[in-house]
Amino acid sequence: MTALTASREALIALLRQICGDAHVLTHDDPATDLRPWEQDWRKRVHGRALAVVRPGNTAQVAAVVKACAAHHTPIVPQGGNTGLVVGGVPDGSGTQIVLSTTRMNAVRAVDPANLTITVEAGCVLQNLQAAAEAAGFLFPLSLGAEGSCTIGGNLGTNAGGTQVVRYGNTRELCLGLEVVTAQGEIWHGLTGLRKDNTGYDLRNLMVGSEGTLGIITAATMKLYPLPAAQLTAWAAVPSMDAAVQLLGLAHQRLGPGLTGFEVMGQFALGLVDKHYPQLRVPLWQETPWCVLLENSDSESEQHARSQFEALLEAALEAGCVTDAVVAENLGQARSLWHIRESITLAQAEEGLNIKHDISIPVSRIPAFVAETDALLAREVPGVRMVDFGHLGDGNLHYNVQAPEGVDGKAFLQGNEERVNTLVFDQVAKFNGSISAEHGVGELKVGKLPLYKDPTALSMMRAVKKALDPHNLLNPGRVLG
Ligand code: FAD
Ligand code: MLT
Ligand code: ZN
C-alpha cells in the first residue's frame, strides 16, 4: 500500500466514524452510483469524487472539514446540484470530497414577530417556501429549479430568480448565517438582525462565494406578508424597446406590486412549444417577444385586476403591447409561469448550447440586443438566439444555439470560445456583468481576469488566501 493510498483509507475511515458508514459513499462499492453527485446539471463535466460525504448536522460538517484539512483533501460543497456553471461537482482527479448538505434539511425556527425563518442549508427551496406559507408568510425566492435546489446552494450562488425586481437576490433575503470555516471552526452568525454595523460584513462575503470561503450550514432568511392577491399577465410586445417601455409603465402603475417581469423571445418560446406542446404557449407565433408580468397586491384581487387592466390598456394605447391575456385564476397563472420555467428544459432537450447570464443597465438592453444579434449573425451565420430572462432586473439569458441541423456538441467545440468573446466584449462595452446570477464556477473562471476590475480581483484573492490559505474549499472555482 502506498503512503497516498494509506492516507486515503485513513481519511475514509475517519469520515465513516464521523458521519456513519451509510453516509460516506465511494467508488469501492460497485453497487454505488456516484454519478448524481459527479455530473453537473447541464452535463458539461463529469468529475470523479474520492468520496461523497453526507453529514447530518453542523458538528459533523466541522469534523469532516477538520479531517479533510488534516489529510490535505479538497472539499466541494454541494446542495441540489442544479448549478449552471460547474461549481458544485468534483474535478476529474478523484482526490476531492463532495460534501452534500441534503441530509441537513430541517426548518429550525420561525419567528413571526421578527419576520424570519431559520433553516438548515440542505433545505430544498420549495420546502422552505411551503414552511413559510404554512406559517402564514411569503418566502419570495423563486426559480425554475426550486423543487431540487437548496437554500445553501441559493446562498452559495446568490441566486436571483423571478421575484428580484421586488424582493432582491438571495443576498437581500438573508439576515444571518451559520458557517463552517476552512479550519473546521463554526461561525454562529444566525442573528436575524436587520441592523448590525460591528465591522466587516462577513455574511455578505459568504453569500455568492460559491463554496470557496466557507460551508454554509444554516441561514436565517426574511419573511414577508402573503399578498392578498397575485395576478399574472402574458403580453405580446413588438420589440425589446417596447418591452422596456412596458417595464417603465408597470413600475409607474403598480409600484411595489410589480413582483415579476420576464421577457421571452420567439425562438425560446418556440422551443417550449416544440418539446412540450401540451403547455400551449400563448401568442408566441404572432410576436417577436412576450412578457410575463406579475402584480402582487396587499388589498384584494379586484384591486389587483383593475390596476392590471388599466396598465395593459395604457400599454396597448402606447403601442408597447399588441395583445395580452390576464390569468383568470391561480391555475392559469401557474400554467403561464410553468411555460416560462420550461425554457431551460426545452433548451436542454434541443441540445447543448452556449449559455450566457448577463446583466446590462435596463435602459441599454435594446441597443445591446440589436447590436449583438447583428454581430453574431455576421460572425457565426445561422446561430439561433434563445433569448429570455429577468428583464425587470436587466438580466438576460442570452443563449446561443447551434444552427439548424448542426450537432450541439460539435458546434460548441468549434465556436464556444469565439462566441463567448464576442458576447462578453459587447457586455463590457455596455458596462454589464458576464455573470448576473449563476456565478462563476469553473465555467467562467478563465474569463474573470479579462472582465473584472483588476483591483477587485486582487482583493478577492487576498480574501481567499486569508480565509482558506491551503485552498481546500472548492479549489479552481471563482478564482483559478
Ligand atoms: P449546487 O448546484 O449544489 O451548488 C451551487 C454552488 O453553490 C456550488 O459552487 C457549490 O459549491 C455551492 N454550494 C452549495 N451548497 C453550499 C453550501 N451549503 N455552502 C456553501 N456553498 C455551497 N439560478 C438563478 O440565479 N436564477 C434562476 O432563475 C435559476 N433558474 C434555474 C432553473 C433551472 C431549471 C436550473 C437547473 C438552474 C437554475 N438556476 C437559477 C441555477 C442556480 O444556481 C441554482 O438552481 C441554485 O441556486 C443552486 O442551488 P443548488 O442547491 O442546486 O446548488
Ligand atoms: C432562468 O432564469 O430560467 C435560469 O436562470 C435558468 C437558465 O438560465 O437557463
Ligand atoms: Zn435566470
Image (cartoon, grey):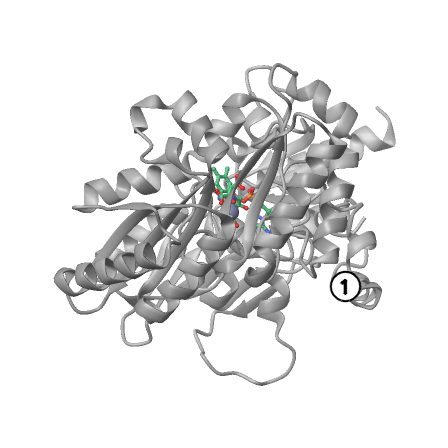
Q: Is residue 301 left or right of residue 177?
A: left
Q: x and y percent of residue 226 in the render?
A: 24, 63
Q: Classify 450 as above or below 267.
A: below
Q: State the residue at coordinates (81%, 59%).
A: 469
Quarter of the image for residue 4 reads: top right
Q: Classify 411 as above or below 65.
A: above
Residue wearing tag 1:
460
Q: x and y percent of residue 444 in the render?
A: 73, 45
Q: Which residue is situated farthest in the bottom direction here? A: 197
Residue 103: tell me if it is visible: no
Graded by Cα atoms within 10 Å as few (under 14), some (14 to 19) or many (20 or more), the crowding at tag 1 reads: some
Quadrant where the image shows the N terminus = top right
Nearest the eye: 120 or 301: 301
Q: Classify 223 as above or below 10.
A: below
Q: x and y percent of residue 359 in the render?
A: 61, 55
Which element is circle 1 on? helix
Residue 267: tell me if it is visible: yes
Quarter of the image for residue 94 reads: top right
Q: State the residue at coordinates (38%, 34%).
A: 286
Q: Say how many tags the image has.
A: 1
Nearest the eye: 390 or 5: 390
Nearest the eye: 440 or 281: 281
Q: State the residue at coordinates (46%, 39%).
A: 288
Report the amino acid beneath label 1. Met
Q: Which residue is situated farthest in the right direction here? A: 2
Q: x and y percent of residue 466 in the render?
A: 78, 66
Q: Is residue 231 left or right of residue 455?
A: left
Q: Note whether ligand 1 is within 8 Å of mark 1.
A: no
Quarter of the image for residue 398 reads: top right
